[in-house]
Image (cartoon, helix red, strand yellow):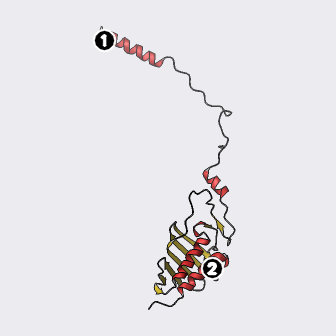
């Protein structure tokens, strides 16, 4: 009897499970599918629309008007200028420390401390860390010089590459001052 009851119970459960299939969920019709582009542009699209780089050789600045705080005067630890001439494989590297130490191709040179302060003032005056622009041509230099100016300072580190024909006068004045510092008499 128990076996018969167990078989009847299993059959009932089997029939209950198989019977009364639920209706399938209808697929969306083409009119219900949302194919419209999102209403907000992607972040990349916004960046591409808002960044305007000045023409090659013109000095521009990054807008920092929304930055809180009072701007501090530029202080630097090291300024390095590398000069590569178009008709030479040699380069000249001038390193200037804030303490007044100047090295031209690793040879110490004597410099007036006022000249270091003049350099700091010039970098601060042109807002070096906010400069924006393209100051070098594409490829290697075919005439003149290519400059690599790196400043490590109180607000970080920044390098600008420039060619003679695309260098704005403000940057050219800094390059000229650094070159004159590097041409001073060697320390004995």
Q: Position of residue 88 (x, y in %)?
A: 57, 86
Residue 146 falls in image quadrant: bottom right
Q: Is residue 9 above or below residue 134?
A: above
Q: Which mark sits nearer the N-terminus, 1 or 2?
A: 1
**CA gap, disc 1 to disc 2?**
105 Å
Q: Nearer the viewer, residue 40 or 24?
A: 40
In this figure, which residue is indicated by the disc labeled 1? 3
Q: Nearer the viewer, residue 130 or 35?
A: 130
Q: Nearer the viewer, residue 128 or 36?
A: 128
Q: Residue furthest top?
A: 1
Q: Position of residue 176 (x, y in %)?
A: 60, 82
The quarter of the image holding the C terminus is bottom left
Q: How many marks?
A: 2
| Residue 125 can be seen, yes or no | yes
Q: Residue at x 41, y 13 (%)?
A: 12
Q: Nearer the viewer, residue 135 or 38?
A: 135
Q: Residues within 10 Å of mark 1 (few under 14, many from 20)?
A: few
In this figure, which residue is indicated by the disc labeled 2? 173
Q: Residue at x 65, y 59 (%)?
A: 51
The quarter of the image holding the N terminus is top left
């Amino acid at each position: 009897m128990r076996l018969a009851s167990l078989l009847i119970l299993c059959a009932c459960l089997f029939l209950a499970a198989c019977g009364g299939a639920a209706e399938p969920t209808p697929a969306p019709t083409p009119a219900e599918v949302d194919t419209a582009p999102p209403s907000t542009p992607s972040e990349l699209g916004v960046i591409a629309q808002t960044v305007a780089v000045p023409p090659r050789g013109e000095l521009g600045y990054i807008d920092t008007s929304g930055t809180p705080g009072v701007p501090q005067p530029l202080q630097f630890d090291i300024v390095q200028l590398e000069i590569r001439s178009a008709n030479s494989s040699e380069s000249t590297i001038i390193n200037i420390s804030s303490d007044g130490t100047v090295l031209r191709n690793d040879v110490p040179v004597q410099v007036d401390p006022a000249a270091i302060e003049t350099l700091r003032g010039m970098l601060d005056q042109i807002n070096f860390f906010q400069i924006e622009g393209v100051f070098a041509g594409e490829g290697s230099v075919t005439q003149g010089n290519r400059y690599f100016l790196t400043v490590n300072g109180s607000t970080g580190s920044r390098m600008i590459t420039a060619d003679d024909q695309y260098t704005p006068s403000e940057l050219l004045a800094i390059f000229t001052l650094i070159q004159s510092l590097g041409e001073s008499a060697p320390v004995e």
